[in-house]
Image (cartoon, rainbow, N blue to C red):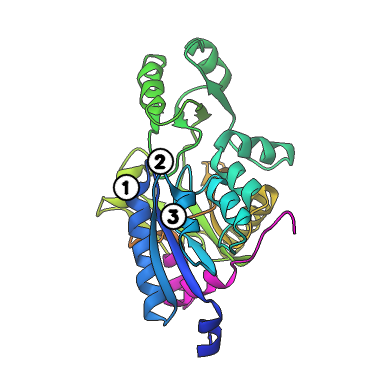
Amino acid sequence: MSLTKEDIQAFGRVAVLMGGCSAEREVSLRSGNAVLDSLLRSGVNAFGLDLGEQALTQLMAEKIDRAFIALHGRGGEDGSIQGALEWLRIPYTGSDVMASALGMDKFKCKQVWQGLDLPTPASSLLNPTSDPDELVAKLGLPLMVKPAHEGSSIGMSKVVSVEQLSAAYKEASRYDTRILAERFVSGPEFTVSIVDGQALPVIGLKTSHDFYDFNAKYQATDTEYLLPCGLTASEEQALQVLALEAYHAVGCESWGRVDIMVDENKQSWLLEVNTSPGMTDHSLVPQAAAHVGISFDQLVLKILATANLKVFCG
């Protein structure tokens, strides 16, 4: 993406929104600072804004022509900040309120996909009175137990026996009141990044962990990111098509990432959509972009250029 000096100036004063109050705060700060450094290198009049509990007051105190959302998790990726920006008439990157909220709620997102006959593992919401035996009879074993409203695999556990369900529920409950149990898919995991309507090359994920957990994503040094992903050209294209269908079904726009598992029968299963993916040195969207010759700085500008004003009145 080639922008002129005039194009850069036309972005105006850009706020990179980062931090927040979710469990993903530290990852968000890393993403936000990487984005901010990139924008400054490109000559954009950008500044960082670490949003706290008084986020609306912070936004109103600044002159902001455009916002790059680098927030992850609740408060930043669930439609909340998107709604505030719409009230303030500030164009922002990423999906609108509805798509952000659906993407953040894994169970509601899966219901949308199921309604459109898109493949996603069977699941059930848990509560303190859920019968473990009934759950296992319905979904089988192993299971993944996870907070419905968290990202970065926070609070997730793989359950291989009925006896492990209680501990897994307790761990997930540290982060959310809405807990999801999902049939575990055995097989390789893939992720498809989407920027401005274009599906980037599929990345295959290989980890020594039981699953692609928080440590594998942000701390481990042995996690492998396969580019090329190891699939045939037709198989990769099929995953890209499925990811775009899932992305548009939720109403996503601007950019995002769709995570998919493929089982031993080569059946693809949609796991989740990320409407504000990470932009750290371990992050997947920059890796996919680099594979087709898009540098980090070009990627950041390309995403910023998708920011638009989403207002419901006036």
Whether residues under marks 1 and 3 lie with C-beta atoms below 8 angstroms apart, the answer is: no
Which callout, 1 or 3, points at the residue further toward the start of the chain?
A: 3
Is residue 288 highlighted in magenta? yes
Dot 3 alpha-carbon crowd within 10 angstroms: few under 14, some 14 to 19, many 20 or more: few
- Of the 4 image quadrants, the one containing the C terminus is bottom right
Could you tell which of marks 2 and 1 lies nearer the N-terminus?
Answer: 2
Q: Which residues are magenta?
A: 286-314
Note whether 80 is above or below 199 in the view shown.
above
Mark 3 vs mark 2: which is more N-terminal? 3
Tell me the distance, in whole angstroms, between the alpha carbons under discs 2 and 1.
10 Å
Q: Nearer the viewer, residue 94 or 20?
A: 20
Report the residue marked by disc 2.
Answer: 153
In screen coordinates, is 191 left or right of 220?
right
**Residue situated in front as seen by the camera: 33 or 50:** 50
Q: Nearer the viewer, mark 2 or mark 1?
A: 2
Q: Is 55 drawn above or below residue 70 in the view shown?
A: above
Q: Which residue type does callout 3 highlight?
A: Gln
Q: Which residue is mark 1?
A: 216
Label 3 sits on residue? 58
Percent across and percent down for residue 175 are 40, 31
**In what element is the residue under mark 2?**
loop
Residue 72 drawn at (x, y percent): 44, 49
Amino acid, disc 1? Ala
Kindly indicate whether the residue at mark 1 contacts the one at mark 2 (C-beta within 8 angstroms): yes
Numbered badge on residue 280: none
